[in-house]
């Protein structure tokens, strides 16, 4: 009778014991994500500020022109590093392939500042800013700036100065 009772009790408690293993795992994962949130700053929103000098993107008559910027969130930077300026302008989706996670475009007027706040995708490890200059410096590659996710700040925007035909990343204050 005791053996039968123990056998019946084991059968009845088995689902409860098995489900508690999953509950333990969920609790453990929840604790890990809380620890990550407390000890590691998560960048959920990309904050960028662009400040343009009065002399940017000049035409042949030395007149400053507005500049279009492409902001690209990338999972890897390999395709961007290997990209030609002209192909990146005409076929960014094809050139960047599967590394392109999200993108946004904006224009900067000479002498003005523009701020950008956009959701930071979880799989994005890099943010690239590409300036569509009339005369880019292809030799030095100053038409683009790449920031790793670790270089971003969750609270303060990173500032990129547009000067002549270059993009300059300012130091964090």
Image (spheres, helix red, strand yellow):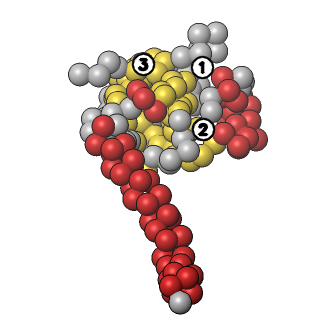
Q: Which numbered disc covers residue 135? A: 1
Q: Position of residue 68 (x, y in %)?
A: 51, 37
How far apart marks 1 and 2 lie (CA) works out to 28 Å
Give the quadrant of residue 153.
top left
- Expressed as whole percent of the image width and height from the top left, the position of residue 143 reads 55, 22
Q: Give the percent coordinates (x, y) of residue 65.
A: 47, 30
Identify the residue at image location x=66%, y=39%: 99
Q: Which residue: 56% across, 87% down? A: 4
Q: Is residue 30 above or below residue 136?
A: below
- In the rendered image, which quarter is residue 40 located in? top left
Q: Mark 3 points at which residue?
A: 168
Q: In this view, does 93 lie to the left or right of 73?
A: right
Q: Do the residues labelled 1 and 3 touch (CB within 8 Å)?
A: no
Q: Quadrant of the C terminus?
A: top left
Instruction: Classify mark 2: residues with Cα within 10 Å, few (<14), some (14-19) or many (20+).
Output: some
Q: Tell me which label, 2 or 3, sits earlier in the chain.
A: 2
Question: The residue tagged with tag 2: helix, strand or loop?
Answer: loop
User: Which residue lies at the image location 59% right of the left edge and 10% below the top edge?
Assistant: 140
N-terminal-most mark, 1 or 3: 1
Q: Which numbered disc, 1 or 2, marks the residue that appears first in the sequence? A: 2
Measured Cα–Cα span from mark 2 to mark 3: 22 Å
Q: Which residue is drawn at 34% across and 20% down?
A: 170
Circle 3 packing at 10 Å, graded few (<14), some (14-19), many (20+), is some
């Amino acid at each position: 009778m005791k053996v039968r009772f123990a056998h019946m009790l084991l059968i009845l408690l088995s689902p409860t014991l098995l489900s508690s293993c999953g509950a333990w795992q969920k609790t453990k994962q929840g604790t890990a994500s809380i620890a990550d949130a407390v000890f590691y700053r998560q960048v959920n929103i990309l904050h960028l500020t662009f400040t343009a000098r009065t002399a940017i993107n000049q035409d042949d008559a030395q007149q400053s022109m507005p500049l279009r910027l492409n902001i690209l969130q990338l999972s890897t930077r390999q395709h961007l590093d290997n990209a030609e300026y002209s192909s990146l302008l005409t076929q960014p989706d094809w050139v960047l392939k599967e590394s392109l996670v999200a993108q946004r475009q904006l224009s900067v007027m000479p002498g003005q500042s523009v701020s950008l706040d956009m959701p930071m995708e979880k799989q994005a490890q890099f943010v690239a800013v590409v300036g569509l200059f009339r005369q880019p410096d292809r030799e030095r590659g100053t038409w683009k700036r790449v920031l790793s996710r670790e270089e971003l700040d969750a609270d303060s925007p990173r500032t990129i100065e547009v000067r002549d035909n270059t993009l300059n990343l300012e130091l964090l204050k």
